[in-house]
Amino acid sequence: MSSAYQVRRATTDDLQSLVSLWNSAQLPADTLDKRFTEFQIVEDKTGKLLGAIGLQLSGTEGKLHSEAYSDFGLTDHLRPLLWERISTVANNHGLFRLWTDESPPFWKKEGGFTEPAADVLAKKPEAFSETKSRWLVLQLREDRAAPSSLDAEFARFKAEENAQTGKIYQQARFFKGVALTLSVMLFIFVAVGLIYLFKVRSRLPH
């Protein structure tokens, strides 16, 4: 049945349909319309918008928000498709965690979200703070992945810098050798010229 739908990122062409969807779901369309690029949408073969969900990013954290559907009879079919898309986007961005205050049981049963412990909840970005207090979280990867990836990136950068420095030194040695060779040749040319002039002058009658 999933072949009957297409899931993709929202564009400006979808904005009018999104506003209608948000209004019907009693979501703040006047605020969300400025954040439409956060949304992944699902549509049917005719291009009709059937559902949407936002993914707000804050560093290595992401928040699912403003889930809405035009036909709740299709929710069980559409939500897994949107979740698959969101999972791909989150992994592509290298997110550590996904947060949500959406209430449908799907996010716990199928999505794997759980209620965060106090130490995990403390890691929730302030940008995600809202009036709702019930949060769910899904750990995508360990936080320690960040330092190792940074170390790998720094090592790569250092290797490239060393290679570039070595190349510069090699070029400098080459040009220094060329300059030295030209200096020696010029000295020889001048010396030969002086010797020739001295011999020619010595042969001239006094």
Image (spheres, helix red, strand yellow):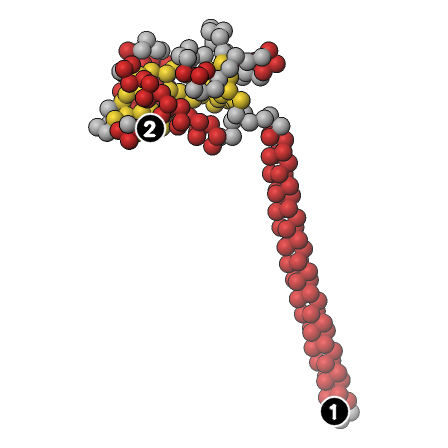
x and y percent of residue 4 in the render? Answer: 26, 29
Disc 2 element: strand
Mark 2: which amino acid? Val
Which corner quadrant of the image does residue 51 belong to?
top left
Residue at 69% across, 74% down: 185
For the residue carrying disc 1, how many other residues have a C-alpha within 10 Å: few (<14), some (14-19), or many (20+)? Answer: few
Check the picture and name the quadrant holding the C terminus.
Answer: bottom right
Mark 1: which amino acid? Leu
Whether 36 is drawn above or below 169: the answer is above
What residue is disc 1 on? 204
Closer to viewer: mark 1 or mark 2: 2
x and y percent of residue 15 in the render? Answer: 30, 22
Residue at 41% across, 12% down: 105
**Numbered disc total:** 2
Residue at 66% across, 66% down: 178
In the image shown, does 87 or 178 lie closer to the viewer?
87
Reading the chain from its start, which is encountered first: label 1 or label 2? 2
Disc 1 element: loop
Decide if residue 141 is on the left or right side of residue 38.
Answer: right
Residue at 34% across, 29% down: 8
In the image shown, does 74 or 195 lie closer to the viewer?
74
For the residue carrying disc 2, how many other residues have a C-alpha within 10 Å: few (<14), some (14-19), or many (20+)? Answer: many
